Amino acid sequence: MDRLAFLLKSFAPDAVVAERMLGSFRKYNTDDIHLYAVVPAQDFAAFSAFRGSGITLIAEEEFAPHLIDDPVNGIRPGYINQEIVKLAFHELSLAESYFTVDSEAEFLRPFSHEDFLHPDGFPYSVLVEDHDLAVDPDYHRDYWQSRSEALRLIWQEVGVDDPVIRTCHGHQVLNAKVLTSFSEDFLKARDWTYVDALAVSPYEYTWYNAWLLKSQIIPIHPREPFVKVFHAEKDYLQAILAGVRAEDLARGYVAVVINSSFARHIDSPSATANKPEVIARALSYGELAGVLRRKAAHSLRKFRSGN
């Protein structure tokens, strides 16, 4: 059993972006950390690049006893199943801890075991309050309030004493001891399955984090997020306008993710990114025309004022 592995849960529509992730993973993986990619068996051909030394393809069907075919509280089966795979992966006994990585991730710098594991061998855990998202008016309106209510349900079900919810959106190092305890001491004690838990609240990482904090079964070593996630297009544009490049992000993060809801056509911030290119891709022709008109008007006012 490896001390640490990486886990990717993906499917054919994400194969192209997953290959980009794979390229950066191979480039910066200085410790030969093993990567396991779990995809439906029918999608193996689309993930042919995920073969070779240090990389293993696993059929999603390995987890068939846990998976579902019908929506849960209106959430499509595919979404719930990828959450289940992350929680159940420890049952394969392949790694003591595993870092879950998204298809959209792009690694920015060399990484090793020491980035993810404390010197005592137990994982660093991302446990944050996300104050930056709480103060964003758009995020607060569209996501924060409903998400907070769902996370509070997990806190109540698990019985975490600390009323402050500290968790993560993703890219957590999940530990097999914690998940085994969660399965045996929490789920089975209630005659629950993974699906039952996710039906209460569909946030797999918060179920893990809540049980980590409640059980204290391993030492807890909090860390800030490993991955910079641009949750909204405006955040990405603000970073580019501020001159943030990949090398800047690498000072604080191992990888970057640009949310797929707006970024299928956008590259990660890189040394070649420039303001005109990024803005042009982000705006419609009408919006660009509006920008040009306002820029011209601003220049005319400056000319007339002599500044």
Image (cartoon, grey):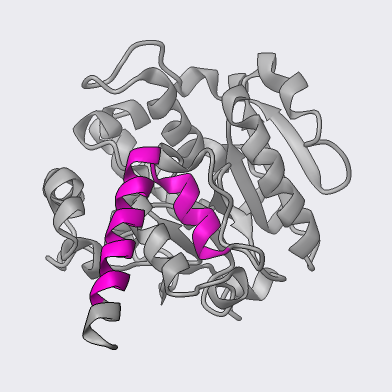
Magenta extent: 274-301
Seen as rendered, the residue at the extreme right is: 53
Q: Is residue 99 left or right of residue 215?
A: right
**Which residue is depicted at the point 42% across and 35% down?**
83
| Figure check: 269 above or below 112 | above
Question: What kind of secondary structure does the magenta stretch mostly adopt?
Answer: helix
Q: Quadrant of residue 18?
A: top right
Residue at image location 28% in from the left, 36% down from the top: 202
Per the image, is 169 magenta? no
Expressed as whole percent of the image width and height from the top left, the position of residue 174 reads: 49, 54
Is residue 85 in view from this perspective? yes
195 relative to 64, above or below: below
Question: Which residue is drawn at the image coordinates 27% and 34% (left, top)?
Answer: 197
Would residue 61 be found to the left or right of residue 46 on screen? left
Residue 279 drawn above or below residue 132: above
- Residue 263 placement (x, y as % from top left): 47, 43
x and y, in percent, of residue 67 in the image: 45, 20
4 and 115: which is toward the camera: 115
Residue 180 visible? The answer is: no
Q: Nearer the viewer, residue 51 or 264?
A: 264
Q: Position of residue 276 (x, y in %)?
A: 51, 59
Residue sitting at x 79%, y 43%: 55
Looking at the rendered image, the quarter that the C terminus falls into is: bottom left
Task: Give the total number of marks visible in the rendering.
Answer: 0
Check the image and name the residue furthest to the bottom. 307
